[in-house]
Image: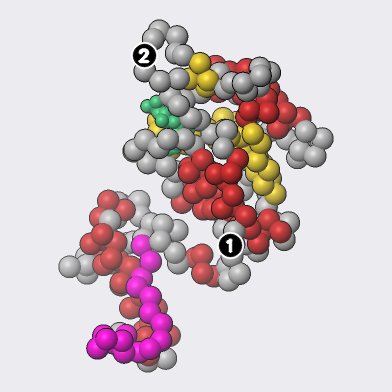
Amino acid sequence: MRIDVVTIFPDYLAPLELSLIGRARRAGLVDVVVHDLRDFTTDRHRTVDDTPYGGGAGMVMKPEPWGRALEHVRTRPEAPGGRPRLLLPSPGGRRFDQAMARELAAEPWLVFGCGRYEGIDERVAEAAAEHFDVTLVSLGDYVLNGGEVAVLAITEAVARLLPGVVGNAESLVEESHEDGLLEYPVYTKPAVWQGREVPAVLLSGDHAAIAAWRHQQRLERTAARRPDLLSPASAARPDELAVVP
Ligand code: SAM
């Protein structure tokens, strides 16, 4: 997968060189290129913002550097072919979730445009739609200072779904949000810690009993912590939900 990020704070994306994503990059599983929006300005001060038409507080990102930057990203000689998916982080965008992470993991090419200030001039997304599949994407119903944190979160959630990025692919299957349920509680050695014992069934060696216990735990945990996930559309069957206290 190819990922391009356009930002005025390239250093903000440095964590993408660490841990699993860093290793995936070095292994050639994900190619991440960060572009400095200021490289696409033409004035001495490398200006990327201006006052809003109509007045009001704050500044707005100017369209010209964005137009040039996105054209550069799209037409670089080493860019993959096809129509890239342009993701514009925005508190007013589509709420990012695991289903969207799966959707994006199937794309060959993601481009992120990180807004700052009061956001990017509206015409940038309109114009970009000629060459990109544009999606406004939100991390949640709160306001961040810029899109970079959203890019970090989305990239990590997407990249770990790519084949080879997470060593044991089976560990992805039962994770929270994969099938509408939260994950079961997990334990490791020692079997007793500060007087607290690991549930006996996990020490029993009875794989069927362990699987049944874990499934029940997933149901109970989801009902207790995130009952909103237990809609009729969730993976849990109504007869299973009936046993949840
Ligand atoms: N004035 C904008 C509004 O009220 O919708 C908020 C601008 S915010 C201070 C600056 C940038 O941070 C946005 O352009 C967007 O890129 C990013 N941002 C802020 N909150 C976000 C969120 N919840 N999800 C994704 N990106 C967000």
Q: Is residue 153 left or right of residue 164?
A: left
Q: Is residue 96 above or below residue 82?
A: below
Callout 1: 10 Å neighbours few (<14), some, many (20+)?
A: few
Mark number displayed over residue 19: 1
Q: Residue furthest right?
A: 77
Q: Secondary structure at mark 2?
A: loop
Query: What amino acid is labelled 2 in the image?
Result: Gly
Give residue 155's position: percent from left, percent from top: 55, 48
Whether the magenta-drawn stretch holds residue 193 is answered as: yes
Residue position marked by numbered label 2 in the rendering: 56
Q: Quadrant of residue 28?
A: bottom right
Q: Which of 33 and 126 lies nearest the eye of the viewer?
A: 33
Q: Is residue 41 above or below residue 22?
A: above
Q: Earlier in the sequence, mark 1 or mark 2?
A: 1
Q: Dividing the image into four quarters, tell me where ligand 1 lies.
A: top left
Task: Give SS at disc 1.
Answer: helix
Q: Residue at x 31, y 86 (%)?
A: 193
